[in-house]
Amino acid sequence: MITAAIAGAITFVFTTMLTIAGVGAAFILIPVFIALGIEVHVAMATALLLNSIAMIFASYRFIKNKLVMWKVAVPILIVATALSPVGAYVSTGLDRELLLWLFVAFLLFAAGMMLLYKPAQKDVESSKRMQIIYGVSVGGFAGFLGGLLGVGGGNFIVPVLVWLGYNPKKASATTSFIVIFSSFSGFLGHATVGNISGTLLSFTAVGSALGALVGAWLMTEKLKPRQVKLTIGVVLLGIAAKMIWNLIT
């Protein structure tokens, strides 16, 4: 019970922070849960399910505030889902460690773009045709590389959409909606080999839902696009730091 309560509090903190950036907290929650003594498969299945729970709550607010770009989100979701298995298949013949270092390099580059680069303002939302084209392109990129590296495609989607000229808030909100489905798909895979603890899920689900609501409120009501962009950059640096730590230890 105490472990589950601690996990719930930690889940609330990280979900609040990462909801602002539009990415799920599973990549942080999994090692935290394992450090708390939770079995690895249970930790992975629970964290991925929490991603979906959090993004459902967050997306409700984002949709209500008309921040989800449907003409971009739907093509990304469809194409990413189709190409993720292709990336996973190709990865079997490549050196995984090299691929992960390349992904770290991409994250560092993307974080630098978020923190330091101010893209020229583009009217990317006026053309329905261009939104669909961008959605298909970003979905293919995120789905293939996500499957190739075994990481969440949201890490690619947010910085690429911002680089293309989309409002950081809309990029984050759109990615949050996509994460609902990608995380639930991952949960189904891990749930077949790991039992879900009802006590752990109860505490962490509450922390995840509350964290998503607070994070979504901060993103829509309190933070400016520039601040959201900076938050995304910091989150990407955090992901890169964690991956570097895993690679050298």
Image: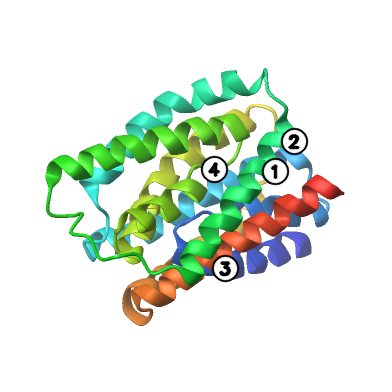
Which disc is residue 97 wearing? Answer: 2
10 Å crowding of disc 3: few (<14), some (14-19), many (20+): some
Q: Which of marks 1 and 4 is nearer the N terminus?
A: 1
Please name the colour scheme applied to the rendered image.
rainbow
Which residue bears the numbered disc 4? 152
Asked if disc 4 and disc 2 are in contact, CB closer than 8 Å, the reply is no
Q: Distance between the residues labelled 3 and 4?
A: 17 Å
Q: How far apart are marks 4 and 2 (CA)?
A: 17 Å
Is residue 91 or residue 35 the one in the foreground?
91
Q: Can residue 33 be seen in this view?
A: no
Asked which secondary structure carries label 1, the reply is helix
The amino acid marked with disc number 1 is Trp
Q: Position of residue 148 (x, y in %)?
A: 58, 30
Which disc is residue 101 wearing? Answer: 1
Q: Where is residue 186 in the image (x, y as percent from the top left)?
A: 55, 35
Q: Distance between the residues labelled 1 and 4?
A: 16 Å
The amino acid marked with disc number 3 is Val
Outermost residue, bottom side: 222
Q: How far apart are marks 3 and 2 (CA)?
A: 24 Å
Q: Which of marks 3 and 4 is in front?
A: 3
Asked which secondary structure carries label 2, the reply is helix
